[in-house]
C-alpha cells in the first residue's frame, strides 16, 4: 500500500531547523509533565489525565481579550476529534483520516506532513476519526483506521517502522491516541459493533515488536470466562478506543473497555460479560490484570466504559487515598480506590431508569424497561469519550453531559458474519419537543443513530467525595466537547452550537465566548511559547490557536 511523506518548502524546512526539540521527550519528562506546563506532552496532558494546566497568563480578568492568532484547515470534513501535542514550540497533530502534521505552535506554519493512505476497505464504526499521537524520544506514534501502529521521526516525519496490530477484514480499527509508558507504546482497538474480540497491547517503542497483549474478552479457562456462555466470547466485543492513564507509583495503567457484542441483544450472551463496560488495571510491564471494576454487567444499552480514567490524590475521610474518578456513559459518577478497585462513591448525574441504584459494592440494581418504553440515559449515554477535567485548585471534577435524552431499544437475534455489523437489534431516540412534551423521534437504522439525538448539553461540576453537583452550565444543544481547566480557575470547552467558551471554574459562570462556525468535538488544550500562553481548539474542520491581544 502506497504511503508518502509530504515535505513543506525548503524555506519552511529551514525554519524547522531553528525550532527543534530542546531535548528528547524522555520517560522522565513524561513522568514530570506537570512541571513543564508550557508543553502538552500526551493526549490528556499528563499520566493523571486531569486535563489541567498550571498556566495562568490567561485569567478571568483578561480572558475577554483573547483573539485568534492562527488557523489550520483539515483537508477532510467530519468530526475532527484530535488533541495536539506541543513540545518546545512544535505542535504535532493528526488530521482525518490518518495524517500527522508538524507545525510551528506560534504561527501555524506547517513543517511537514506524513500521510498514511488508509485502505479503502477499512470499516471503522463511527467515522474516520483519529484522536492524536504519542511521543517518546524523537519518535511519534499513531494508530490507523486499518489496524496499524506507526512510528515516525519527529524531526522529519520519516516512517521508522510500521506494525500490523489487528485484522482490518474483521473490522478492527485504531482511533485512539497511544499511551507511552516507559519503553512501550500501549494501544487498544475499536470495532465493538462488528463482533471483534477486543484487546490492549504494548509494543517496543524502538522496534515495534509486540511485548504483551491483554484480551478484554477471556477465553474458556481464563479468569472471567465464567461470565460468558457457549461461544459468545468469540464475538464478545470489548473494544478499547480511548486513551488510558498511568500511575507510576503503583505501576498500573488503567483502560476503559467498551460494549459487548451484539450490542443490544443481551439474550444472545447471558452472564456479566467481563471485561466489557469495565475499567481494567494492568501491569504495564507484563499486561497482567491486577484488578477490574465493571460498571454495567450484561450491558444491553451500548454503555461503553471508554471514558477517561481521571487520577486524583486526595484525603478521603481524613486518610490519603489514590482515587480514580469516572463519569460513566451509564449515567453514574464513580469514585474508586485505584490501588485496589474498591468502590467508594456512585451517584447518578442525569436521569437514570435502567437501574434503581448501586449496591454497596457499586453493582447496579438493574430495572430493564418494558419493550417499547424509553430508557434513560439513551444510547449515546450521559457522557461519552469527550474528556473530563479535574482541578486541584477547586477540588472539582468537570464533565460534558447529555441530559433529557432517552432511547427505545429493539432486540433481534443476529448471526455473526465477519466484518459486518453485529448489533443485535436497533433503537430510536426518544426525547422532549421544544415545549417539553415527550415524543418519539424518527426511527433510524441500527447504527450511527446518535448524530440526530434529542437532548440537552451541559457542563457539570461535581464534588468527587460525594458525587453531588456543585454547578451546571446549560447549552441549547448536546455537546461532544472535552474540557480544559487551568490554575487561573478558568474552564474552556465547546459544543455543537459552535461556541468556544471560557467559564469560571469555581462558579460555572460564562466569562467569554466566540462562535467558530462549526461543532467542537475535541478537547481544548493550552501551551506556552516565547512567554505567550495559547489555547488551541478544533471547530468543524478548523484548528485555531488563541492568545491575548498584544
Image: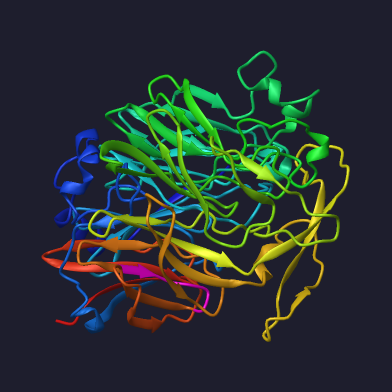
Numbered marks: total: 0
Q: Give the left or right position of residue 55, taking residue 116 as reference.
A: left
Image-quadrant location for residue 537? bottom left
Image-quadrant location for residue 94? bottom left
User: In the rendering, at what x and y percent does residue 41 appear?
Assistant: 28, 48
Please give the name of the residue rendered at 66% of the width and 43% of the height, measured from the top-left corner.
365
User: In the rendering, at what x and y percent does residue 211 appear?
Assistant: 44, 21
Colour scheme: rainbow
Q: Extreme top residue here? A: 221
User: In the rendering, at what x and y percent does residue 456 appear?
Assistant: 58, 73
Report the quarter where the N terminus lies. Answer: top right
Report the quarter where the C terminus lies. Answer: bottom left
431 part of magenta stretch: no
Bounds of the magenta segment:
491-497
Q: Give the left or right position of residue 38, taking residue 120 as reference.
A: left
Please give the name of the residue rendered at 51% of the width and 54% of the height, measured from the top-left corner.
385
User: In the rendering, at what x and y percent does residue 336 appear?
Assistant: 43, 39
Q: Give the left or right position of residue 187, taking residue 56 as reference.
A: right
Q: Give the left or right position of residue 261, taking residue 134 as reference.
A: right
Amino acid at each position: 500500500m502506497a504511503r508518502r511523506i509530504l515535505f513543506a518548502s525548503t524555506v519552511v524546512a529551514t525554519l524547522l531547523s531553528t525550532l527543534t526539540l530542546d531535548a528528547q521527550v524522555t520517560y522522565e519528562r513524561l513522568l514530570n509533565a506537570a512541571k513543564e506546563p508550557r508543553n502538552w506532552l500526551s493526549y490528556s496532558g499528563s499520566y493523571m489525565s486531569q486535563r489541567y494546566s498550571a498556566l495562568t497568563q490567561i485569567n478571568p480578568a483578561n480572558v475577554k481579550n483573547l483573539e485568534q492568532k492562527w488557523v489550520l484547515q483539515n483537508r477532510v470534513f467530519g468530526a475532527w476529534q484530535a488533541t495536539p501535542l506541543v513540545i518546545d514550540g512544535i505542535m504535532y497533530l493528526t488530521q482525518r483520516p490518518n495524517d500527522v502534521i508538524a507545525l510551528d505552535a506560534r504561527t501555524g506554519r506547517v513543517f511537514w506532513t506524513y500521510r498514511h493512505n488508509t485502505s479503502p476497505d477499512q470499516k471503522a464504526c463511527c467515522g474516520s476519526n483519529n484522536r492524536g499521537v504519542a511521543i517518546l524520544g524523537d519518535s511519534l506514534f499513531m494508530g490507523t483506521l486499518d489496524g496499524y501502529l506507526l512510528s515516525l521521526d519527529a524531526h522529519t516525519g520519516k516512517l521508522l517502522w510500521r506494525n500490523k496490530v489487528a485484522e482490518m477484514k474483521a473490522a478492527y480499527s485504531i482511533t485512539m491516541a497511544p499511551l507511552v509508558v516507559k519503553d512501550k507504546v500501549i494501544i487498544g482497538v475499536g470495532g465493538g459493533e462488528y463482533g471483534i474480540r477486543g484487546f490492549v497491547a504494548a509494543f517496543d517503542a524502538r522496534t515495534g515488536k509486540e511485548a504483551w497483549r491483554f484480551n478484554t474478552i477471556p477465553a474458556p479457562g481464563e479468569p472471567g470466562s465464567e461470565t460468558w456462555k457457549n461461544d459468545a466470547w468469540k464475538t464478545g466485543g470489548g473494544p478499547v478506543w480511548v486513551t488510558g492513564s498511568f500511575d507510576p507509583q503503583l505501576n498500573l495503567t488503567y483502560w476503559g473497555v467498551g460494549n459487548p457484542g451484539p450490542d443490544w441483544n443481551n439474550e444472545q450472551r447471558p452472564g456479566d460479560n467481563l471485561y466489557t463496560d469495565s475499567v481494567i488495571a494492568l501491569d504495564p510491564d507484563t499486561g497482567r490484570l491486577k484488578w477490574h471494576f465493571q460498571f454495567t454487567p450484561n450491558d444491553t444499552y451500548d454503555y461503553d466504559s471508554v471514558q477517561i480514567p481521571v487520577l486524583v490524590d486526595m484525603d478521603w475521610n481524613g486518610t490519603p487515598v489514590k482515587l480514580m474518578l469516572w463519569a460513566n456513559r451509564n449515567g453514574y459518577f464513580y469514585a474508586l480506590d485505584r490501588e485496589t478497585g474498591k468502590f467508594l462513591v456512585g451517584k447518578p448525574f442525569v436521569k437514570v431508569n435502567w437501574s434503581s441504584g448501586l449496591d454497596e459494592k457499586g453493582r447496579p440494581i438493574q430495572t430493564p424497561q418494558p419493550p417499547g418504553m424509553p430508557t434513560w440515559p439513551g444510547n449515546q449515554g450521559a457522557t461519552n469519550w469527550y474528556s473530563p477535567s479535574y482541578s486541584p485548585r477547586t477540588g472539582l471534577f468537570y464533565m460534558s453531559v447529555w441530559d433529557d435524552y432517552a432511547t427505545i431499544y429493539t432486540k433481534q437475534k443476529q448471526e455473526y458474519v465477519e466484518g459486518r455489523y453485529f448489533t443485535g437489534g436497533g433503537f430510536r431516540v426518544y426525547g422532549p419537543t421544544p415545549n417539553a412534551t415527550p415524543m418519539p423521534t424518527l426511527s433510524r437504522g441500527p447504527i450511527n443513530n446518535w448524530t440526530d439525538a434529542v437532548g440537552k448539553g451541559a457542563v457539570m461540576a461535581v464534588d468527587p467525595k460525594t458525587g453531588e453537583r456543585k454547578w451546571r452550565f446549560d447549552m441549547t444543544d448536546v455537546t461532544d466537547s472535552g474540557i480544559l481547566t487551568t490554575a487561573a480557575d478558568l474552564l474552556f470547552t465547546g459544543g455543537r452550537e459552535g461556541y468556544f467558551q471560557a467559564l469560571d471554574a469555581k462558579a460555572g459562570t460564562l466569562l467569554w465566548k466566540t462562535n467558530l462556525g462549526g461543532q467542537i468535538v475535541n478537547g481544548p488544550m493550552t501551551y506556552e511559547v516565547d512567554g505567550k500562553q495559547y489555547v488551541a481548539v478544533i471547530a468543524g474542520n478548523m484548528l485555531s490557536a488563541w492568545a491575548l491581544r498584544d
